[in-house]
Amino acid sequence: MRYVDEYRDAGKARALAASIASLCEPGRRYKFMEVCGGHTHTIYKHGLEDYLPENVTLVHGPGCPVCVIPMGRVDDAIHIASQPGVIMTSFGDMMRVPGGDGSFFDAKAAGADIRMVYSPLDALKIARQNPDRRVVFMAIGFETTAPSTAMTLMRAAATGQDNFSVFGNHVTIIPAIKAILDSPDLRLDGFIGPGHVSTVIGCRPYDFIAREYGKPLVVAGFEPLDILQSVHMLLTQLAEGRSEVENQYGRVVPWDGNLKALQVINETMELRPYFEWRGLGFISHSALRLRGSFAAHDAERIFQIPGSRVADPKACQCGEVLKGVLKPWECKVFGTACTPETPIGTCMVSSEGACAAYYNFGRFTRERVREATR
Amino acid sequence: MCLGIPGEIVTISQDQPDLAMVDVSGVRRKINIGLLEGEPLDPGDWILIHVGFALSKIDEAEAKAALEFLESIGQAYADEIDALRESRIE
Amino acid sequence: MKDERLLIKEEQVLERIERARRRKARLREEAITLAHGSGGKASRTLVEAVFLEAFGNPVLAPLDDAARLSVDGANLAFTTDSYVVSPLFFPGGDIGDLAVNGTVNDLAVSGAEPLHLSAGFILEEGFAVDDLRRITASMRRAADAAGVTIVTGDTKVVERGKGDGCYINTAGVGVLRRPPTRDVRPGDAILVTGPIGEHGVTIMLARGELDIEADLPSDTAPLNGLLESLAPFAVRRMRDATRGGVATVLNEIATDHGLAVVVEEAAIPVRPVVRGACELLGIDPMYVACEGRAVVVVAGEDREGALAALRAHPLGADAAVIGQIKDDPPGLVLLKTAFGGTRIVDLLVGDPLPRIC
């Protein structure tokens, strides 16, 4: 596969790994946070950490837009799905996320018409094909996905598809990163920046991280060599005493982002004053809602949603795990009350959540695994 | 939010210029290229696909540069291994 | 000092997880969900908590692809499978092909010569007779190709809306000729008879909701002829890789024998078009269903011979050695990635779901 396989080459990985090791100051420990769930997935899928020296740790941040949706919003979505005549459409990621009272899968078992789609345009198509049903699209994701929702909304408005609406749960990345940076117990040396979000917002929004907080950030692609190269670039910056935003993913990410994408988001959506993030609490201006001009397609206005707030269980320490302060196994309920089959907080909900990933993959030390695969 | 796959444009619809047929390793799907309005797109170009939309046109020059950087590290590493090997022959 | 205490604590947590994993899983749900039918953890829990609970007996207990029976001195294998695929007709075959081949394969991987099948039909009111003729014609063709006969059957009709057109159950009986010895040990080689993930991807695309086209047929095929070519070799286990894919079968082998399964990603055959579809949707081909592929464990010294024998057969042209059995870590499936790293391949809870993250 072009533009994919070249960045999975083991030979180049070994060379990069050697170079990375040589860039490390002896005795110094490095902690880099990768913000995006996709990066976490790549790291686990390819066993990338085997290439990192002992003193370089990758910490998984709050980059899973599905996992951070508060339980109350999942309940609201299920409430909408349970209304007569409604077809709820959603990406696969949402299907197993537990709300206060079960997941989409559970609601489906109880009779709600919930269908998985690959694209919001597919949801619009379902609306066209079912004029007597009300079709709702569960919009999730960071700025990467918001433009697609926006384009679909515009198409719905232009074609008068009145039975189509969107339940907006898009979140924005910068406030989440800022929440991490403002965390008192945090000790990070740099960030591996979200490659696909940056395709939309560009690289400039991260300037404040390098300038005001003095942490280098490298916008990274999603193949394993992309991430290794980004670690290389971060270590190089640190070795040279620099703190800048760099773009490793130049083949896809334009420095200025995608103007048209930003325009369509702006035309259809606006920032909410605040939004609750599962495990992180309320963060201001961190999420999007539909503008008044698109009220006819706003599920939040069309349906009377309970707007229930389900507090994170007291035992949940997702906040600290997300901020990289606690390791998954240091959480009081990890592996006992909170497991992938019975997840409590966001970190266990998605298979890429730091805790789920550790539960499934981390339970044998790298030593033992490496021994067995020699 | 992060899953984006490179795909090659096969055809661009005449009557629906917003849509392109894109190929990923033999798998084909119509992709909305509306977010790349203003960018010249032709069959043979590669784009990044996310939830049925093209988010970006892949820059071949940048891709080449990235690979060259990786090659150079590889070369430096290979050189070091050679140097190490040679230094052992005493 | 602090580091040591943390290390000990981490060890304790990991051990606690291990204990929890070894305990029998509890069925928490009060209603059946789709996950219970996907072949992953949820399916297993349902089988253990409900079916084994109710039926429990030594013949059932191994939960293998077929039951081994000894009846008046004859050693038989007996199995059943139900087919609820939608759409009924897809590239490479239809529900009829699956219904025959699936049951033939369950017998074949048990080391039995498949002989006779039953076929039970649950038809929905309004289902086209022409479609039924198409399906039964496929079944006849598939049975002939596999060398089996359909000797008994049943038909029920349910009201419109209470069935997906046509559901089929087939049961099969065969003579146990060379049951795999089941004495899996470190050093044994693991083979797969062909490229993985084809059936599952074909069905996903055939449903039409994804609007994705590809030149890909289902891999449904009868494996009895192919697997007979392994007669000269020390075959320890054979498993039909259906729902849950190769990953599920490998996990079951690892836990059945308390050994480690170590496989090389680069050695696992996957067609480019399957890879492309899986990358696009964000799913892992290892968990995607096959309908004409077997995973075989043979003695290490028989690795080359078994591979050559499989490859000599048209259905095994792309067979490959994908890994080996080791003793540690027990019960786990480890994957050496093409990138050169390692990861654990765990059981999924339910079906692999397309993702955008």
Image (cartoon, rainbow, N blue to C red):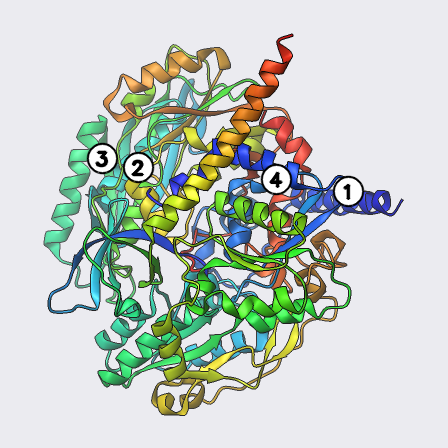
In-image side of A191 versus C308 (left or right): right
Q: Which residue is mark 2?
A: C271
Q: Chain of mark 1?
A: C
Q: Chain of mark 3?
A: C
Note whether residue A231 is visible. yes
Disc 3 residue type? Ile
Are the residues flagged by discs 1 and 4 from a single subunit? no
Q: Which residue is mark 4?
A: A20
Residue C215 locus on image (x, y percent): 20, 44
Residue C234 locus on image (x, y percent): 46, 13
Is C131 in front, or is B61? B61
Q: Residue at x 40, y 75 (%)?
A: A262
Which badge, 1 or 2, comes first in the chain's sequence?
1
Q: Residue at x 48, y 52 (%)?
A: A248
Q: Residues within 10 Å of mark 2 (few under 14, many from 20)?
A: some
Q: Nearer the viewer, mark 4 or mark 2?
A: 4
Residue A223 locus on image (x, y percent): 46, 46
Q: Residues within 10 Å of mark 1 (few under 14, many from 20)?
A: some
Which numbered circle lies on residue C150? 3
Q: Residues within 10 Å of mark 4 (few under 14, many from 20)?
A: many
Q: Nearer the viewer, mark 1 or mark 4?
A: 4
Q: Residue at x 58, y 14 (%)?
A: B86
Disc 1 residue type? Glu
Are the residues flagged by discs 2 and 3 from a single subunit? yes
Q: Chain of mark 4?
A: A
Q: Does dot 1 land on a helix, a strand or a loop? A: helix
Which badge, 1 or 3, comes first in the chain's sequence?
1
Residue C327 locus on image (x, y percent): 63, 24
